[in-house]
Amino acid sequence: MHKYIPNTDAEKKEMMKQIGISDISELFSAIPEKLRRGDKCKIPPGMSEQELIVHMRELAMKNVSAYDLKCFLGAGTYDHFIPAAVGALTSRSEFYTAYTPYQAEISQGVLQATFEYQTMICELTGMDAANASMYDGVSATAEACAIALVSARKRNKIIVSDSVQPETREVIKTYMNGRDVVLLEIPFVDGETDYDALETAIDDNTAAVCIQSPNFFGIVEDMDRVGEMAHDNGAAMIVNTDLISLGILKPPGKAGADFVVGDAQPLGNPMAFGGPHLGYFATSGKYIRKMPGRIVGETTDNKGSIGYVLTLQAREQHIRREKATSNICSNHALNALATTIYMSLVGKEGIKEVALRCANNARYTRDMLLKTGKFKDMFNKPFFKEFVVSADTDIKMLNENLHHMGYIGGYKLDKKFPWLKGGWLVAVTEKRTKQEIDDFVKKAGDAV
Amino acid sequence: MIPGENLKYSKDHEWVRIDGETATIGITNYAQVQLGDIVYVELPEIGMVADRDEAICAVESVKTAADVMTPVSGEVLEVNEKLEDNPELINEDPYSAWIMKIQMADLSDLDNLLSEDEYAAFCEEEE
Amino acid sequence: MSKLIFEISRPGRRAFDLQNTEIPQKTPAELFNNKSIRKVDARLPELSELDVVRHFTELSNRNFGVDTGFYPLGSCTMKYNPKINEKVASFEGFSELHPHQPAESVQGALELMYNLEKYLAEITGMDYISLQPSAGAQGEMAGLMVIKAYHDNRGDFARTKILCPDSAHGTNPASAAVAGFDVVQVKSNDLGMVDVEELRKLSGPDTAGLMLTNPNTLGLFEKDIIEIAKIVHDCGGLLYYDGANANAILGQTRPGDMGFDVVHLNLHKTFTTPHGGGGPGAGPIGVKERLHSFLPVPWIEKTGDKYDFNYDKPDSIGKVKSLYGNFLVLVRAYAYIRTMGKDGLRQVSENAVLNANYALSRLKEAYDVPFGDRCMHEFVISGEKQHKMGASTLSIAKRLLDYGYHPPTIYFPLIVKEAMMVEPTETESKETLDGFIDVLLKIHSEIEENPEMVNSAPHNTVVGRLDEVQAARKPVLKFDFPE
């Protein structure tokens, strides 16, 4: 008898009687004898809850996290503050133990929350429609490229800027592997997309141009210029952005973006060693019926009351099967709920405050690092909450030293950009205080 | 089927009305019943050139989406824009709610189509 | 009717405070070029914290989870989500790890993942596991890419086709198409299983592989699996296992032993990680030795007692997802496997199969049972008889809502008319099953006496039957703010 399995021996006997068998093993008779596992399973014996907690705590304590150290590392995943109400609400089991809301009448909770989420995403990004979320920003970007490709008849070129996060570009490549597509990468100059190179590369075979702003280096790109170039050639513009930045920065929708995608982990979701995060996907009206994944729509019931349902499902895998534009099935509903609750808590004013604080903290940190005399700006452009400085030192050693002194240091840039030696990508969120920053800067300066 | 209207049919459940070199195409009653309430028609682009049996547009209902193959090759001359706002016209009267008009490139494509009786027999087999 | 959060918003209300700072604050205009600055605020809500909490609490009261009641969705394995798993996943030593931290600082996380890989390999009978895919569908895509890489690597570019049974889950052909294959459907025989002769005819030098679930989506064990594996392997193809139905065979048999070359598992089904209202889940894949080098990077390697990531795998299909996978989902699955242990896992499949057969044996009294009265962990009944009496499977499902049950999966698999797929799982008691069965039998009587009652269901839910046609014809996908 196991605590997760209610059937008692007596009940099992009754059930077997009803079925007409005398032993449970009869129900497995279809499995050929030579395939039976018998007693050979090598999984260790089960643990009681008490033992499990001890074991898991031991494992957790073999890690040092942003709970123990002050985090100055970003590169796509960020240490933002998560208000307590987020976790309290997402741990309501009516939300987290629920399935996908296909039976709309008993899933109005998740459906309405998703409708609110879609609305907030559109508000921040300046777009016409958003879906109910995807796995992460990286796959959302790859999906946008796929949709742009399918929608642009007789065009098969996708252009991606090198200032887009490296992992995003890698996954786009993986997704494009099975397709007839020309994937072109445009270099960056002084940390920003080389717009002249882009202008030369765009032609009437280009289905879409994909940029990130703020880009991987934290730098704000010229979306208007890219948008113009794209549209002059009949191509779509895909912008990957940080929703926090949209508290004070121009929404890509206003720059003419056709798709706005990215990772919403910074809004209410923990860093979680990389997952689960949250891909958001927003689009202009033209592409509404091509959006991948689940979408919630408003409708009425047979008495005229407003309700919410999953809609536009005919595009999805369970109906189109091999003709679906995407094979996505699940979304990251619970993470989307966390983000919706976060956006509701910070609200109209709070998102501006968080964004402005991040930007100011980052500028201050950069200025102080430069003041030590040990660091130089690698690029000379306005940045949001991340920036690159360079130092004449081994960045790995620098980070190791800082680790011992209570800090998670910035990203070693030459891991992905080998020619940017000594480059250090530092992120500063609203969680960092002046004291922490001053101490971090001093220790970093001393360690170089 | 409308008795007396000399329509041709395809095995993909499209009907074709021929007028010289122009073919007007829609989907049959059998198709619209199978699809259920139609919610959207993705019309082809005017000027598009397609081969026979190429999927050039799609009809969506709540529960399914179906490609519409063009039963004849040629260039799309006109599309029925009324279907953009009122896709349900296909459910209401599938034989007047045409989808597209094609300038036929090869009249011998018509040889592949079914007559009214042949199509009726074909549908019965499908049941 | 619950108001939308935008409708309860009031200008000036706050639910958030930001700590004070001693750093002098510059304005956006001082930090950025004018053309980069936002001019119009996003209309996020303005509420007090209590407003927000009440709003979402109310929404939760309009939702149905496994903790609320019975959820017999076929192929979804809606089993109990243990609370201890939630607790351990929230440890800061797991949730506050940055993915780019150096390996030395995350040895516990790497150890957990390494051991989870070992356990999943043991459970599936495969040689190597990748925990990277975030969902079953993504696992399928990754697995199919591995198959393609394998054939390409051998110089065999003729392998363009993937075979799928006509009873397969929609993600199977969709994933195959996304991975660049043509999809060929294999018909089922009268017993609902793969038609072996059909398969023999369709297999050839252009076959990259066959995708199969076992038990299949009808809840039937493919008895001819050894023959099926031989046919596919003899023609040079590979065998892919869709692990959606793994709950039936835990501890009993393994896809690796059946001859499968690639496997994906759904941790949010078999391994109790919560469905979350639609996600997140995890879809790790397993492969046999000869496909090892194609797995996504990075791999987790153990040297002595130290763990590290290894990216140096030139034949890898690359990355299908950013970073390493849905780590906090993996933590829950790991905790579950450690809780159940070898004997517990075996009891899972025994009781899952027992429960399903019990429910089937009672339901056949009133519902058509197209494939006999034995099944594995799930079964398919048909509402065809009831449909002829005047009420469709859809109506039966809606009527179940009135009695407080989540309906089974409906209209899937496509090869059964008016299908209802029921999967009770092992965490349900006999009396829960009896309650559900009694209601389904009652609804049958209702259809006999007064089908309109069933056709106009649901009556007792917060909203009645919703107009899905309108939602699809004139999509309203966000709130329309009043000017």
Image (cartoon, coloured by chain):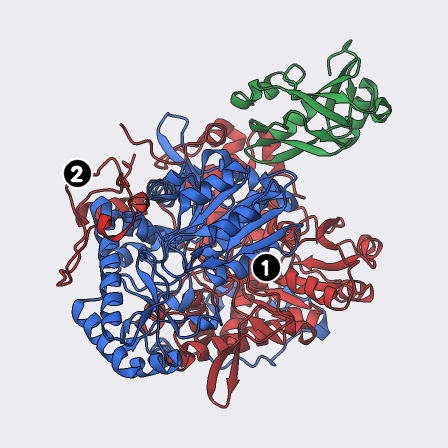
Q: Residues within 10 Å of mark 2 (few under 14, many from 20)?
A: few
> Label 1 is placed on what type of residue?
Thr
Residue displayed at 68% across by 66% down: A29
Q: On the picture, is A130 further left or further right than C205? A: left
Residue underneath mark 1: A174
Q: On the picture, is C71 further left or further right than C93? A: right
Q: Quadrant of residue C4?
A: top left
Q: Quadrant of residue A62?
A: bottom left
Q: Which chain is blue?
A: A
Residue A155, x across and y down, in percent: 63, 42
Q: Which chain is green?
A: B
Q: Nearer the viewer, mark 1 or mark 2?
A: 1
Residue A229, x across and y down, in percent: 49, 41
Q: Is residue A444 visible?
A: yes
User: Residue lying farthest bottom?
Assistant: C304
Residue displayed at 84% across by 22% down: B107
Q: On the picture, is A399 further left or further right than C137? A: left
> Label 2 is placed on what type of residue?
Pro
Chain C drawn colour: red
Frontmost residue, A345 versus C316: C316
Residue C399, x across and y down, in percent: 46, 37
Q: Chain of mark 2?
A: C
Residue C40, x across and y down, in percent: 27, 38
